[in-house]
Image (spheres, grey):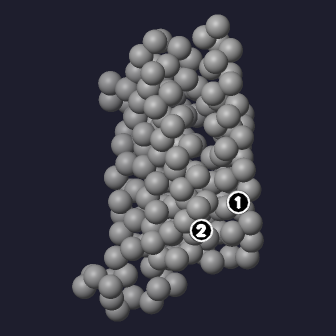
Amino acid sequence: MINLPNTLAAIRILLAPVMFFFLVERDSLLLKDIDISWLNYFAALVFVIASVTDFFDGYIARKWNQKSALGAIIDPLADKMLVLAAFLGLMMIGIANAWAVFLILSREFFITGLRIVAAGEHKDISASNSGKLKTFFQIFAIGFLMMDWPFGNELLWIAVILTIYSGMQYVFSNLEKSK
């Protein structure tokens, strides 16, 4: 089903590799003459635009009652692609801690697998408040790291703690629902 929320999620999927390109292809012929700080700004701008689409696709889907089965799949997929591209790119250029990235991405893949199983069983797969809070901190950590602002690494580790906490909460919540 093609609607505005799904289109915004698709845009986010397309923006993820663009942002990744600005982060990791600094020696390519297209980017070699551009100062690294500008490449970080471009990556951050693309990330912010993509993050804004994340807010609006959910808001519009709820407000205009445009929730769909495709949206339930494509929205979290787009989110994961964006976060994956950002954290891997930041790790590859030596800005994000590899352990932090590993812990965040491991949780994301694990919970995505659980969500796929839950969706197949027609169970509620919406994000919890702790999941939304972890996403907020992940986005802020990524932005601060891209812009090389103070406290970026501290925000990253707060995001790691919230990521692990929300993942555990998701698992325990679904274990109780399946009893």
Where is 48 relative to 11, above or below? Answer: below
The location of residue 61, given as percent across then percent down, is: 51, 28
As drawn, 175 above or below 110 = above
Residue for badge 1: 157
* In the displayed structure image, the side of residue 27 where residue 44 appears, left or right: right
Q: Going 63% across and 27% down the picture, which residue do you hit?
A: 171
Determine the residue located farthest toward the left in the rendered image. Answer: 29
The C terminus sits in image quarter: top right
Look at label 1 and name its amino acid. Answer: Trp
**Residue at left 45%, top 72%?**
92
Q: Amino acid at mark 2?
A: Asn
Circle nearer the N terminus (2, 1): 2
Among the 4 quarters of the image, the one containing residue 107: top right
Position of residue 169 in the picture relative to residue 120 (left or right): right
Residue 161 percent coordinates (x, y): 72, 50
The answer to whether the residue labelled 2 contacts the one labelled 1, judged by CB atoms less than 8 Å apart, is yes
Q: Which mark is residue 97?
A: 2
Mark 1 closeness class: few <14, some 14–19, many ≥20 residues within 10 Å: many
The structure residue drawn at horizontal position 66% and vertical position 46%, both measured from the top left corner, is 163
Q: In which quarter of the view is residue 2 placed?
A: top left
> Helix, strand, or loop for circle 1?
helix
Nearest the eye: 170 or 85:
170
